[in-house]
């Protein structure tokens, strides 16, 4: 599956704003993932954002507009949320999701 190049650029810029550095990039899940300190922070699958928010934040963030379980394997991956393109069309909304992803990934040890 291809990924939305425009969204990828917005994610790069957004992660730079919140982390102060450019993320590493890796093709995973048929899309593009962004890595911070060797850990997956978020990604793009098609034109949707894949948000890694962790198990604690997962239940409440699933209630956000445009959020859904990441279950393309047939089993939901706890701690990971698919956010549809419309929900991150505005920069402020995308930035909020990226901040959540970064907050979680910063709790993980570097790889």
Image (cartoon, grey):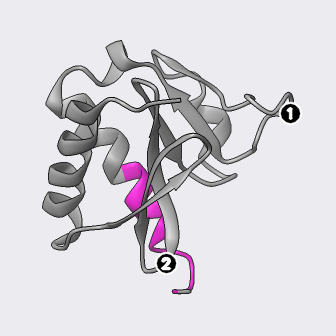
Name the outermost residue toward the right: 75
Q: Secondary structure at mark 1?
A: loop
Badge 2 crowding class, 10 Å Cα cut-off, few under 14, some 14 to 19, many 20 or more, is some
Comes first in the chain, label 2 or label 1? 2
* Left or right of 52 in this view: 79: right
Report the front residue among 111 and 54: 111
The foreground one among 36 and 63 is: 36
- Which region shows up in magenta? 100-110
Residue labelled with disc 1:
75
What residue is rendered at 62% in x and 54% in y? 54
Q: Is residue 2 above or below residue 53?
A: above
As measured in the structure, the alpha-carbon distance from the residue carrying label 2 to the one carrying label 1 is 25 Å
The percent position of residue 90, horizontal first and vertical second, equals 18, 23
Residue at (39, 61) in percent of width and height: 102
Left or right of 77: which side holds 56?
left
Residue 38 numbered mark, or none: 2
Residue for point 59% across, 47% down: 57
Q: Residue furthest bottom?
A: 110
């Amino acid at each position: 599956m291809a990924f939305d190049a425009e969204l990828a650029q917005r994610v790069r810029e957004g992660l730079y704003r919140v982390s102060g550095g450019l993320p590493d990039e890796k093709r995973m899940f048929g899309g593009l993932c962004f890595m911070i300190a060797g850990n997956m922070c978020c990604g793009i699958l098609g034109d949707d954002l894949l948000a890694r928010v962790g198990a604690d934040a997962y239940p409440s963030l699933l209630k956000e507009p445009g959020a859904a379980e990441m279950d393309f394997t047939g089993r939901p991956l706890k701690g990971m949320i698919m956010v549809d393109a419309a929900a991150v069309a505005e920069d402020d909304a995308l930035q909020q999701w990226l901040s959540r992803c970064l907050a979680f990934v910063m709790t993980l040890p570097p790889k």
